[in-house]
Amino acid sequence: MDNRLQQLIKQLENLVVKETEDSDSPWIKGSRLEQLFNQKNGSTIENVLQTHGYYDLKTLLRKSHIFAIYESPIPKEFYIALLRKTVSGSQKSSIGNQPMFYTVKRPWKVEQSMIKELQDDGYLPTPNPIHKLYLTQTNLPYTPKYPAKIISQDDLKCTLVEIVKTLSGKKIENYVTIDELNNPFYKNYGQNLRDVRRKIFPDLNLVDLLQTIPEIKLEKIQDTWRITLNIS
């Protein structure tokens, strides 16, 4: 990667850091990042990308391996966060001397002494990403926007969000159990959720996968998990 492209990625990273540093969420819209870039440089990000042989901001961000991308069912709308703020153990950055973060995926298995050791070593808890999507609630039945096929990680994540929204009636206070996800998934795709998840996310179980999705929240209740919409 040449120096000019590295400088561009660093500038985009700085913009994300500045925009989210005082926010409860590490996620910003792709359109917002483009707007910030245009304001700072007086030219569109599309023009700059083309000089480097890229025609899509999302492609550049993914290839940099320092950004997390979250697709939404709305065409051309996606969200961006720094990978190190959303994935446990991810420390890569184009900016030096960045803070380190930890994520507690299974709180009931973690002793408080371990968390204290992490904090004593300078680690910070990973911020909880909260989307502003889907603020409107109605009494009408929700019509899910499933991807036609599941061929990518984003497709599977979007499908899981749509299932939760459908089963919960799109209401924040209504919960869905993790065991309820397979039936609507099988009805729509003719495959078991477990089989597709193992193919798309071979290194993640379903609980860990759900915890990477900003729009939903998990809570351990006795022997099962409750899933609710995570919308502010």
Image: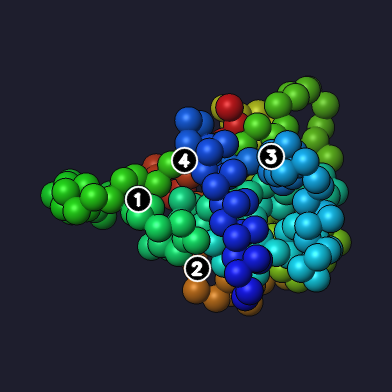
Q: The disc labelled 2 sits on which kind of residue?
A: Leu
Residue 118, horizontal then vertical, whole percent: 22, 53
Q: Earlier in the sequence, mark 1 or mark 4?
A: 1
| Viewport quadrant of the C terminus | top right
C-alpha gap between disc 4 and disc 3: 28 Å
Q: Which residue is mark 1?
A: 99
Mark 3 surroundings within 10 Å by alpha-carbon count, few (fewer than 14), some (14 through 19), many (20 or more) = few
Identify which residue is drawn at 49% across, 66% down.
205
Q: Which residue is mark 2?
A: 204
Q: Secondary structure at mark 2?
A: loop
| Viewport quadrant of the N terminus | bottom right
Q: Which residue is mark 3?
A: 40
Identify which residue is drawn at 80% across, 35% down.
142
Check residue 128 in the rendering and tell me which mark sits there, or answer none. Answer: 4
Q: Is residue 188 left or right of residue 63?
A: right
Between residue 30 and residue 209, name the one nearer to us. 30
C-alpha gap between disc 4 and disc 2: 19 Å
Residue 6, horizontal then vertical, whole percent: 60, 65
Residue 99, horizontal then vertical, whole percent: 35, 50
Q: Nearer the viewer, mark 4 or mark 3?
A: 3
Q: The disc labelled 4 sits on which kind of residue?
A: Asn
C-alpha gap between disc 3 and disc 2: 39 Å
Q: Earlier in the sequence, mark 3 or mark 2?
A: 3
Q: Secondary structure at mark 4?
A: loop
Q: The disc labelled 3 sits on which kind of residue?
A: Lys
Q: Is residue 204 left or right of residue 32?
A: left
Mark 1 surroundings within 10 Å by alpha-carbon count, few (fewer than 14), some (14 through 19), many (20 or more) = few
Q: The disc labelled 1 sits on which kind of residue?
A: Pro
Q: Nearer the viewer, mark 2 or mark 1?
A: 1
Q: Earlier in the sequence, mark 4 or mark 3?
A: 3
Q: Earlier in the sequence, mark 2 or mark 1?
A: 1
